[in-house]
Amino acid sequence: MRFGRSAVPAGVSSRPRRANRGWRTRLLIATAAALAVPTAALATPSIASAAPAFGIVKRMNPGGFDELMVPSSMGPIKVQVRWAAHGGSAAIYMLDGMRARDDHSAWNNPDEGNAPGVFANDDVTVVMPVGGQSSFYADWAAASNTNGQKFTYKWETFLTKELPAFLAQYGVDPHNNAIAGLSMGGSAALMMAAFHRDQFKQATSMSGYLNLSAPGMREAIRAAMLSAGAFNVDAMAAPWSPAWLRMDPFVFAPQLKGLPMFISSGNGIPGPFDHPNSVGSVIDTGDAMALEALAMVNTRAFQARLGQLKIPATFDFEGAGTHSWPYWHDELTKARPGILQALGVAGA
């Protein structure tokens, strides 16, 4: 099971990658049923391996692109950055899906998310952390014991303390950020914004899993993590512990009051970007249909939860669409005006 994915490297099959593979589809369909009840290619980046001296603001070329190696408790983390077009201080953090790669963010790929293209003419820095496979961008309780992980994931600490402090030395305001993500990253985007309101002024979730404590969801996530890097969900948080519930948007929804939000999902029916033309692509499309149907059920439940709490948000349910990148790129484009407004940035 794949909750989101990244680009296919050179030399590997270019068949569109989906969010899962066949043997888990029946699990996801069953889970969904249970839940229904209650710009062009960028220039070669330069590498900045250390922050400038304290007190010195070092701004890269406005509109330019860099890769930063940012110190963290997990070791150096690569962060791909497209600087604000006119040197402004606002930023949007872009979170990847379950199969986030260690070499680049799929949001930086012109053929997938292409977030730099979406904000190409806007005075907002696009921050794309690299890595975090299966992490849900959370602070884990321990290192995963099913794949020999040598360190414990501390992604929330990185995204809300270490990274903003590092970027502040380049002139990025740590208190005027938005955050967006797909699938696993959609859930995490809402979590970061809910508990770090001083940093994040807007949150966007695309095909997110927003009801993690619903029946069957933990085991669906367990299967997904084992497939994506053999990670153990129990190392992330114990079942229904305070740490687990803190990750569940359905539970922490009251914390989102007053936060501008854009939340979207397809319905799992193949749409305009789905053109399976081989056995493999037919299987991928089937998996992406099941995953998006599950995301839709989660998102509808979350919509009802916000309605009960009288918390407004912008929801966009596509008429058709599967768990795949072209739809997420389009949804980010739709979310863009609200993101810029929340950050106080004029659109191009």
Image (cartoon, rainbow, N blue to C red):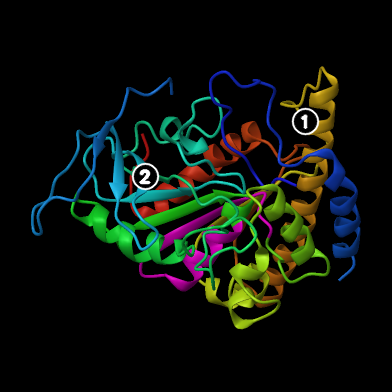
Location of mark 1 (residue): 271
Q: Is residue 289 left or right of residue 131?
A: right
Res. 337 in view: yes
- Residue for point 33% across, 51% down: 76
Q: Is residue 212 left or right of residue 124?
A: right
Between 155 and 305, the residue placed more toward the observer is 155
- Residue for point 67% across, 71% down: 250
* Image quadrant assignment for residue 245: bottom right
Q: Could you tell which of marks 1 and 2 lies nearer the N-terminus?
A: 2
Q: Is residue 180 left or right of residue 36?
A: left
Please name the amino acid that badge 1 sits on. Answer: Gly
Q: Would you call the spot at circle 2 few (<14 residues within 10 Å), some (14-19), or many (20 or more)?
A: many
- Residue for point 79% across, 44% down: 267
Q: Is residue 232 left or right of residue 82?
A: right
Region rendered in magenta:
187-209
Q: Which mark is residue 78?
A: 2
Marks 1/2: CA distance?
34 Å
- Residue for point 21% across, 41% down: 87
Disc 2 is placed on an element classified as strand
Residue 305, relative to residue 51: is it above or below? Answer: below
Q: Would you call the spot at circle 1 few (<14 residues within 10 Å), some (14-19), or many (20 or more)?
A: some
* Image quadrant assignment for residue 320: top right
Name the spot of residue 253 as percent of width and height, x first.
61, 73
* Image quadrant assignment for residue 22: top right
